[in-house]
Image: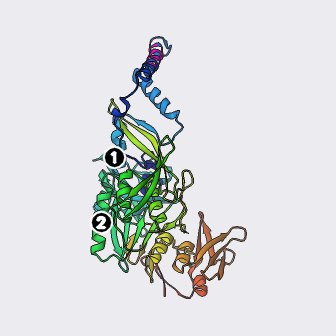
Amino acid sequence: MMRSFKKLTAAAAGSCLALSLVLSPAAFAADSSEAASKTSSETELINEVMQYIENYNLTGADRDALIRAAIDGMVDSLDDPYSQYFSGEESKEFQNQLALDYVGIGVQLVFTGNELYIEQIMPGSPAESAGLKRGDTILKINGVKVSEIKNDPISGEAGTKVTLLIQRGGAAKTYTVKRSEINYPSVSGKIVGPKIAYISLNGFTEDSDEEFAAVLKKMRAAGMKSMVLDLRNNGGGYMDSAYNIASQFIDKGIMMYTADNTGELTPVTITDGSKMNVPVVILTNEYTASASEALTGALHDNHLATVVGTQTFGKARIQSLLDLSDGGLLKLTTERYLTPSKADFNHIGLSPDLEVKGEAAQIITALQLAGMKSIEAAGDNHILDVGGTAFAGNVGLVKQGGRIYGSARVLSALVESNLAWDAKNKKVIVTTGSGKASSFTVSSKEALSQNGETFIALGAFKKKFPSLVWAYNQTQNRLTLSVK
């Protein structure tokens, strides 16, 4: 597993994004006699070809394989990456994806190109029970060095075990973890800082709308004054759930427009929703796709949320699930959709109001917009805590040449400034809202550039941004950053 679980989830969900209601096969029963006759003739032609292949093909043929090839050929001819046929067995796995069910140990992994480490651990998971912790570096999996692994050895059948050699705090230790069936929560929430509700929406399952309503109720009971809605790495799911969640924000209005193969635009309206009545910040990235893009567009275009992060995936198409006689499913693109402002962003994506790169910088910026005036970010090059709460990301701790460096993205976010990298002159440029620019060059060792990321020496940064307060705990190898 060479990528984080959240990214694996987003990639896998690419085959099951934005599902609409299932169409009834009865809808096709009203064919005219002329159409029925033509269909019968075409079916006979397919059977005729298949019969010839079975009887005379030199190398032999498997009937089931021929049928599968014919179905796949029809679907592939649509040149639509989102339409797909699933056999009975495949449809079960597909439904598990939709429900965010999988078999594993309950960790979110990140591979930097040099090391594989645990960024987050699911509460109550086998990994937590075995004693694994955030920030642990995985050296070997089942005795094989991470650098030599080509597939995903952590996944496997429920009840089987995986052995991990873990490095933590300079010491190595072996852990054996039993895989189990895990339901990845589609919605989770917590109160951060000054009554900011942080709600993470990981997918749109059939129950996500009910789960969201339950989490929202808890957040309101805790005194929620603003909200950060995290849709990063959310690959989509059932559009009905997205509609019901949008109804928690929009009392009356248009969620989106849809169009079927006639091309006619139809508004999807919300008439009996409710108002959120608190400021909302939405977090997006390149894995925010489909139903999550529909929700983002709905809230943004109705002037109910500010969007922070990076350009979304760009999937403005809806699939329907059709039950087939063999127990399988046909996932077929049946509609396109546009945002309330009638933007068709397919293959383009939605642009954020404020572009911010990097997980840690994104959450810091979102919390600032949501009302957190004083922010403390702590961690190392693996983990991140903001205001004492764990989040995905890290502070980018680097020790080199007797200096302590922090992520340039995190530092610029803390002082609410814009960041740029001058590749020609090899320098990091941090520009404040008032337009004052400060440069940190690699040649002076005030900045570093490693693996596509930039870092700034904390001593040099504080000279130009005196509001920064930083402390490094050598024993815990932990960096703490804040602004006065």
Q: Which mark is residue 215?
A: 2
Residue 443 placement, left or right of 418: right
Determine crowd level at label 2: few under 14, some 14-19, many 20+ residues with C-alpha closer than 10 A: some
Q: Is residue 145 visible?
A: no
Q: Where does the image place residue 426, in percent across and percent down from the top left?
A: 69, 71
Q: Where does the image place residue 29, in percent across and percent down from the top left?
A: 35, 29
**Which label lies toward us, 2 or 1?**
2
Residue 331 magenta-highlighted: no
Foreground residue among 309 and 376:
309
Q: Which mark is residue 96?
A: 1
First in sequence, mark 2 or 1: give its number: 1
Q: Where does the image place residue 482, in percent across and percent down from the top left?
A: 48, 82
**Residue ranking furthest to the right:** 424
Real-space Cα separation, disc 2 to disc 1, in angstroms: 23 Å
Q: Residue at x 49, y 30 (%)?
A: 74
Q: Residue at x 32, y 56 (%)?
A: 208
User: What residue type is disc 1 on?
Assistant: Asn
How many discs mark residues in the rendered view? 2
Residue 191 placement, left or right of 371: left
Foreground residue among 286 and 157:
286
Q: In the rendered image of this protein, does residue 94 appear above or below residue 167? A: above
User: What residue type is disc 2 on?
Assistant: Val
Secondary structure beneath disc 1?
helix
Residue 50 magenta-highlighted: yes
Q: Which residues are magenta?
A: 44-51
Q: Where does the image place residue 222, in percent across and percent down from the top left?
A: 28, 76
